[in-house]
Amino acid sequence: MLFPTVEYAVFFLAVLAISWALAPRRIAHKSFLLAASYLFYGFWNWRYVPLLFLISLFAGLIGQALQRTDDGVTRKRLLIAGVTVCLLVLAYYKYTSFLLLSALGLWGFVGHTPGWNISTPFLPLGISFFVFHAISLMGDIYRRKLREPLHLLDALLYVAFFPQLIAGPILRASNFVPQLLRQRSLQHIRVNRAFLLILAGLFKKVILSNTLSTRLVEPVFSAPANFHSVDVLLAIYGYAAQIYCDFSGYTDIAIGCAMLLGYRFPRNFNAPYTATDPQEFWQRWHISLSSWLRDYLYIPLGGSRRGVSRTYINLMITMLLGGLWHGASWTFVMWGGLQGLYLVIHRLWVAAPSPAVQRLRSSTAWPWVARLLMFHAVCLGWVFFRAPTFGLAATVLHQLGSHGAVTLAAWPVVLCLVLGLFGQYAPPVWRRSVEATMSRMPVAVNGVALALGVFAIELLGPTGVAPFIYFQF
């Protein structure tokens, strides 16, 4: 993790206390949060704080220039220039070696491959997220969704705000920047809700995700040929649960921390494995990214406005680029291609005129059959997402027909797997009931309960908690 759990708790509590003490002084409050955000990022590597600052400053200056002019041609040129610079920075750090190695590999098919040594730029933590935030700032101002005069301090804090800096959720400037203009008020903070989110996030990450990673997923994906088909299948299911618990756990913590600081983040996950089709899955999984891709890529490409064939092409382009956004690897492109293919097949299925298809879709059993099919389609994609090479992915899939001794299906692993997957079917009324119970208890009791919960999670979690999966993006 960027911060170990206890160290982050100390850091956050100090930031929380000072930020609320400065709340009546709006400029001082935001300046302190910005400094804390740079300190948070600098804890990982101080050398890349200037990059974060410059990307934020550049987006803010372009945003201000967009607000100062009403000329359509000038505004379009400013937007194109701003987005191009941001994408070039992202491409340099994230895709330079990928593109060069791919070109050399292609060269090898037609001739002698030169023996060049390719140095890879060090990938700044969370660069995909803060570059997308910079683009959102410029895009929302260009579309006039953000009409309030933009101050550079607000632009800097929007891009660098530490709860979402490393792994999202991806905030829209039009939703977050206006919050920076309002006075903070403790009376509007849902403290119990924030505490529950933080505890739930820590439980999902530290206990569920890391147990599945260390005791199931890592062993199988490191050497899949050594394991029985049951272990391999459990590892595939385990990675589906791991990545959900890992990423939604981070999101819960980020939303809870932002809530305590007086800011609202959008929901990023909504029980994605309960989805019955690919479109619904992307309305529930990493919602801030899927909606960003829809609004800033799919719709500008033409969306579904230019005929059926063009719609399918736009879907494939959007998901292929979405896959590449996750990492500079052809396995990520394959994962994105599968997601695009699922979306195209779903549209063909919905449009099928067959009466038999219509009867099947209207049957009472179909939603559960569809959930089962959708979950396994997602799991197939996760194999390519997790495996660093096509060869390893092929080996994992081949081992589903293997034989031998089952070695990894221990009860703690199976319990974490069940909680990670089927916990998404828990009715929301349970959470509301717990929150209502907490609201009737003294603040001191809730504080002690939170501290004990964090301590128990830290105690019960496996040794050596792995970094959040989405830190690499």
Image (cartoon, rainbow, N blue to C red):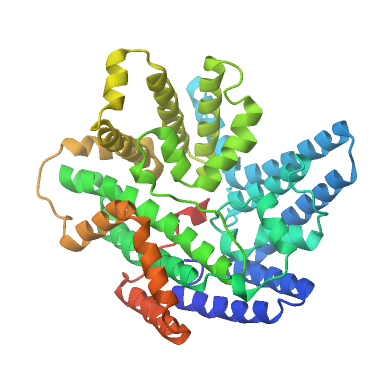
Query: Residue sitting at 30 percent across and 60 percent down?
Result: 214
Towards the viewer: 442 or 31:
442
**Residue 302, x across and y down, in percent:** 63, 24
- Residue at 86% from the left image edge and 31% from the top image edge: 73
Give residue 432's position: percent from left, percent from top: 40, 64
User: Residue 177 lies in what quarter of the image?
Assistant: bottom right
Q: Position of residue 453 (x, y in %)?
A: 37, 77
Labels in figure, total: 0
The residue positioned 69% from the left and 50% from the top of the image is: 174
Note whether residue 296 is visible: yes
Q: Indicate left or right for 365 with 281 as reference.
A: left
Residue 11, above or below 272? below
Query: In which quadrant of the rendered view does residue 178 lie?
Result: bottom right
| Horizontal side of residue 439 vs 42, given as left or right | left
Question: 51 or 97: which is nearer to us?
Answer: 51
Question: Looking at the image, which is closer to me, 270 or 438?
Answer: 438
- Residue placed at 37% from the left, 13% from the top? 353
In this rendering, the answer to whether 423 lies above or below 281 is below
Residue 204 visible:
no
